[in-house]
Amino acid sequence: MANHTICENGIWPELSNCTLCPRECHVNRNAGEMGYCGQTAALMAARAALHFWEEPCLSGTNGSGAVFFSGCNLGCVYCQNHEIAHGLSGRGLTVSRLSDIFLELQGKGAHNINLVTPTHFVPQIVTALETAKKQGLSVPIIYNTSAYEKIETLKRLDGLVDIYLPDLKYFDSTLSRHYSHAADYFEKAAAAIAEMVRQVGAPVFVDGENSLMKKGVIVRHLLLPGCKKDARHILRYLHDTYKNDIYVSIMNQYTPLLHVESIPELNRKISAQEYEKIVDYAISIGIENGFIQEGETASESFVPAFDCEGI
């Protein structure tokens, strides 16, 4: 079980010299300073609502109870949630209000609580989850992350999170440096995913496969234009390392938004042929536990309205 920190007099001890993520900014977020994530110690979120665009075993029929937190510790240049990742949208809320939001989403029929980009608010989230669980929160908890995480931070979630939903964005450090200013991305993300698997183990479903997931790890890879070689390296690594102990979600929904117009190689969608080749490769190396996307998914419709609904 994780070692949970208690807030005293409105101060979160970890945030006075913040090293929650691999950026290790060492800023005093309690004093209003912002680190790489763009957030102080004050909780901010931009949406809390039923979300129907996750993998089928997460969204089900009722939807996933997604809470989109403001800010991000990775900051990809092509970010699909640019509006909130860069702190442009969101509303402040208390830890008590966050706890209530979890219960409200459960009351609306959410199959789970989906914490989206939560890394920089882990201490507050831990407290909110513990409070909500004491008040009847019983659906699975999803930690939805870029995987640019520190193992020490993830260990605080041990026993609280049921499903980990990390990305594995890059294998090549040149790509991660260029697109996410994180040359050490693969090293940190690979270690983080190993810790996630250690915590929750192999996938468990409500009524066998093809139903709702209760526990497990789904690793996502968003195929980027011109990055097929890197995608193959990632898929090979995941299969060689975990076999069927995880699910792999290969995504073709990359959408070039306005902020990538100055990056020519990213200013296009993935072609159907590019995606099919990566899916065929996954099948050829023996990946069986996987999700693929069919049809035209590259669309801004996959980006929800960050209008503070439910906050």
Image: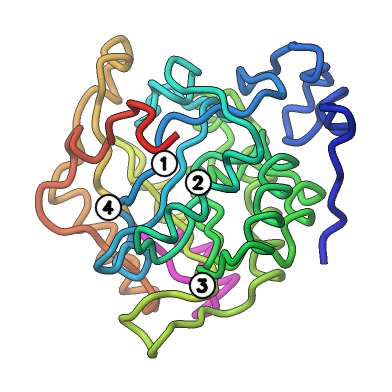
| Mark nearer the viewer, 2 or 1 | 2
Kindly check if marks 2 and 4 are in contact, taking CB atoms under 8 A apart as contact. Answer: no
Horizontal side, residue 5 vs residue 281: left or right:
right
Q: Considering only order in the chain, which callout, 4 or 2, is on the residue closer to the N terminus?
A: 4
Residue drawn at (71%, 70%) of the image: 198
Vertical relation: 221 (above or below) 178? below
Question: Of 233 and 110, which appears nearest the observer?
Answer: 110
CA distance for labels 1 and 3: 27 Å
Horizontal side, residue 15 vs residue 286: left or right:
right
| Mark nearer the viewer, 3 or 2 | 2
Kindly check if marks 2 and 1 are in contact, taking CB atoms under 8 A apart as contact. Answer: yes
| Mark nearer the viewer, 3 or 4 | 4
Residue under label 2, please give it.
101
**Helix, strand, or loop for circle 2?**
helix
Residue under label 3, please give it.
246
Kindly check if marks 3 and 2 are in contact, taking CB atoms under 8 A apart as contact. Answer: no
Residue drawn at (71%, 62%) of the image: 195
